Image: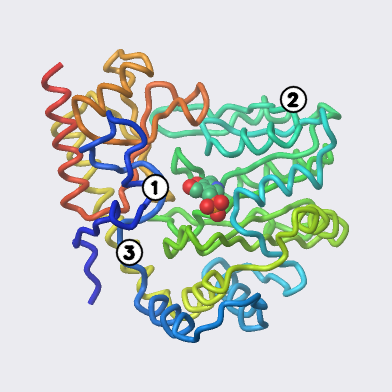
């Protein structure tokens, strides 16, 4: 019923992913920025067409059906009972990070992250006047783990007010377990640290891994948590700029709302509203099919690398559609590794160092593309390795 093997000309759509930013990226297979090369769910296409055919695009309300769709999705797919009043909307999850810093942290206070992690975490924290504290993840036997001792030590600093969690984690692909989340939450509770949990990848979880919203652990944890969700990764709708920010604590929510109001981001794009309702109400079957396709792409990548270029190491993917690949055994520094993959392999991936120094020597491959494209990218990398 669904076919994700087709190839879309994303350059003709001005897709950021497919448009080279400098000459070395020309003629490369682009598998970097995190969106999908698949056609959107038919149900979303239809809802958008129907609305766009009505020729007036003035300010549009998030009606009750919008909130009902969000609440129902969180309940159905993630077993989390969210109340209508807890939901604020933002034009994307990156702005939601900035609002978290603005509403929780005073200039000079500190925010902790767990690198290697999505680069906008550090950017939004620093651009909004806070000091960055890192609790690097540890790579142990091919799996990333949290350094709880270091986390607990750094959380004790009275200037540390906020912790940015990424669950599932971009780029390392971990889906944090209940036990791991509980330990993090306990430390935050003990030390009055607010949690900003970026759960934008929460609909992409594989095998036995289970996504658990940290706020769902207990009412106490929910009281100290700001959860950022969005249908943008789930249904590849990123250009509509959408975020649902879930905050139980009334005081925290009010402060957060002040930050939203300060920059006047109080309404959503009509396309964002219609696509969210359609995706969360009718998109589940399409999503299941995408997840199945991604599982097969993941298996292809793992078996290809193991059989044909074992010098590259993979980490087991529990969540997200982003493969974190370890090229350190090639012995190249970041600059050389980057220009080698663009100029020799002709494959454009996200560079590991952009996720923090901890990502040096790694690359992130976005596997949400046609299988033939993913396979060709692997073959190009294989050829470039053999040519070394
Ligand atoms: C962890 C994470 N948060 C946020 C975003 C971007 O959010 P938005 O496009 O809604 O601003 C991304 C995009 O890749 C992401 O990986």
At a point 75% along the width and 32% down the height, the residue shown is 130
Comparing labels 2 and 3, the label whose residue is closer to the camera: 3
* Residue 265 in view, yes or no: yes
What separation in Å lies between label 2 and label 1 (alpha carbons)?
Answer: 40 Å
Q: 129 and 263: which one is in front?
A: 263
- Across and down, in percent, residue 336 comes to 31, 16
Residue beneath disc 1: 16
For the residues carrying marks 2 and 1, which lies nearer the camera in this image?
Answer: 1
**Disc 1: CA contacts within 10 A as few (<14), some (14-19) or many (>=20):** some
- Sequence order check, earlier mark of 3 and 1: 1
The residue that mark 3 highlights is 290
Looking at the rendered structure, the secondary structure element under dot 1 is helix
User: Which residue, given by chain and number where applicable, does mark 2 sit on?
Assistant: 153
- 280 sits left or right of 317 in the view: right
Q: Nearer the viewer, mark 3 or mark 1?
A: 1
Mark 1 beta carbon near ligand 1 (under 8 Å): no
């Amino acid at each position: 019923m669904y076919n994700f093997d087709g190839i879309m000309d994303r350059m003709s759509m001005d897709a950021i992913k497919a448009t080279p930013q400098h000459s070395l990226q020309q003629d490369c297979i682009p598998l970097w920025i995190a969106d999908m090369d698949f056609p959107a769910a038919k149900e979303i296409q239809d809802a958008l067409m129907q609305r766009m055919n009505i020729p007036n695009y003035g300010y549009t309300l998030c009606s009750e059906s919008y909130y009902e769709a969000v609440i129902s999705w969180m309940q159905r797919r993630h077993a989390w009972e969210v109340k209508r009043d807890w939901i604020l909307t933002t034009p994307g999850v990156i702005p939601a990070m900035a609002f978290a810093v603005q509403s929780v942290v005073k200039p000079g206070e500190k925010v902790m992250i767990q690198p290697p992690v999505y680069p906008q975490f550090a950017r939004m924290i620093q651009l909004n006047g806070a000091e960055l504290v890192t609790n690097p993840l540890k790579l142990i036997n091919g799996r990333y783990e949290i350094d709880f001792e270091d986390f607990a030590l750094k959380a004790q600093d009275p200037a540390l007010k906020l912790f940015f969690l990424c669950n599932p984690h971009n780029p390392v692909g971990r889906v944090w377990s209940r036990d791991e989340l509980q330990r993090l939450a306990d430390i935050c509770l003990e030390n009055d640290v607010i949690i900003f949990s970026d759960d934008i990848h929460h609909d992409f979880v594989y095998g036995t891994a289970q996504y658990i919203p940290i706020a769902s652990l207990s009412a106490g944890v929910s009281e100290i948590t700001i959860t950022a969700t969005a249908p943008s990764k789930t249904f590849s709708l990123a250009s509509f700029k959408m975020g649902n920010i879930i905050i139980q604590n009334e005081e925290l929510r009010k402060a957060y709302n002040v930050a939203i109001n300060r920059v006047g981001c109080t309404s959503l794009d009509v396309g964002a509203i219609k696509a969210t309702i359609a995706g969360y109400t009718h998109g589940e079957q399409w999503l299941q099919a995408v997840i199945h396709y991604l599982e097969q792409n993941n298996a292809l990548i793992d078996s290809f690398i193991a059989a044909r270029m074992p010098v590259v190491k993979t980490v087991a993917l529990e969540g997200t559609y982003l493969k974190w690949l370890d090229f350190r055994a090639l012995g190249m520094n970041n600059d050389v590794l980057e220009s080698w993959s663009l100029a020799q392999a002709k494959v454009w991936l996200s560079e590991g160092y952009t996720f923090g120094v901890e990502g040096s020597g790694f690359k992130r491959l976005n596997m949400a593309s046609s299988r033939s494209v993913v396979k060709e990218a692997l073959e190009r990398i294989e050829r470039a390795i053999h040519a070394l």
